[in-house]
Image (spheres, rainbow, N blue to C red):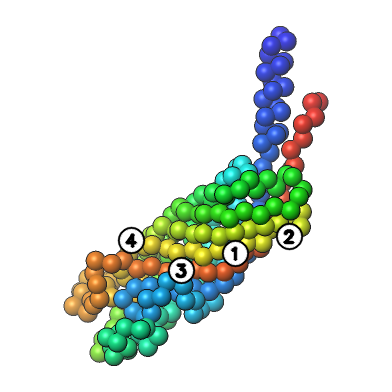
Amino acid sequence: MKKVYFILVLLINLSLGNAQIYEIGVFGGGSNFIGDVGSTKFIAPNEIAIGGLIRWNRSPRHSYRASVIYTNMFADDNLSSDPRREQRGYYFSAKTLEISTGIEFTFLDFNLHSGDFIFTPYVYTGISVLSHRNFYFVNNTFILGKSNSNAFGIPIALGAKFTLTEHLIFGMEIAARYTFSDEIDGSLPDPEELNSLKFGNINNNDWYVFSGFTLTYTFGRNPCFCIY
């Protein structure tokens, strides 16, 4: 009986000691597109991006994360340093909504139970899906389609975060998305009957980047080592 009691007490202490803190907050910053239209600069935000995110801190070194980000994706050949694109003169502007989920790893212990000022760089990856309007180009004219498509991708983010107060965390990050689609910029039109209008490098898929800041509020019960 004493052994059973000891095991129960140990399990309770372990579970309480690993009690988690959750975060909910906002993202604000900019977006830029990298594909067959516009500039090929990797970090060159040209439209506002806003959204929200949640984190579930599973340990001082990793957390699960989900986000929703809205932006007007924009690209213009006149902003490119490629003379061929400048001469072509394509551009597009399309409203998009992205949902992303994955796992975040910190380089340093980020123990929200400590109550002290803490700081750490981090990386984030997972899976994303971008909902965007289909469009195409005819005689250098941008034509908006009537249907939407979803571009699945892999987020690759590098950032840093630190505590402002006991319950507020501020972060900065640059997050690239490699997609499995070449349709976002209209270079591979959908539906298939518009394939005669395709252009660009069909062997390179589209990328887009979010650069910005996060502010999250922490909540959840702190660990208790008491035995009741």
Number of numbered discs on residues? 4
> Which residue, given by chain and number where applicable, does mark 3 sit on?
209
Give the x, y percent position of residue 163: 71, 57
Q: Secondary structure at mark 2?
A: loop
**Among the two numbered marks 2 and 3 on one chain, the one whose residue lies closer to the N terminus:** 2
Q: Residue at x 59, y 64 (%)?
A: 172
> Badge 2 is on which residue?
164
Quick one: label 4, few (<14), some, or many (20+) residues within 10 Å? some
**Mark 4 or mark 2, whichever is nearer to me:** 2
Task: Say which quadrant the N terminus sits in.
Answer: top right
Tell me the amino acid under the disc marked 3. Answer: Val
Q: Earlier in the sequence, mark 3 or mark 1?
A: 1
| Residue 225: percent from left, percent from top | 77, 31
Q: Give the CA separation, mark 3 to mark 1.
A: 14 Å
Q: Residue at x 24, y 69 (%)?
A: 202
Residue type at tag 2 = Leu
Q: Nearer the viewer, mark 3 or mark 1?
A: 1
Specify the amino acid type for callout 1: Met
Residue 121: image quadrant is bottom right
Residue on which the image places disc 1: 172
Give the amino acid type for the residue marked by disc 4 in the picture: Phe
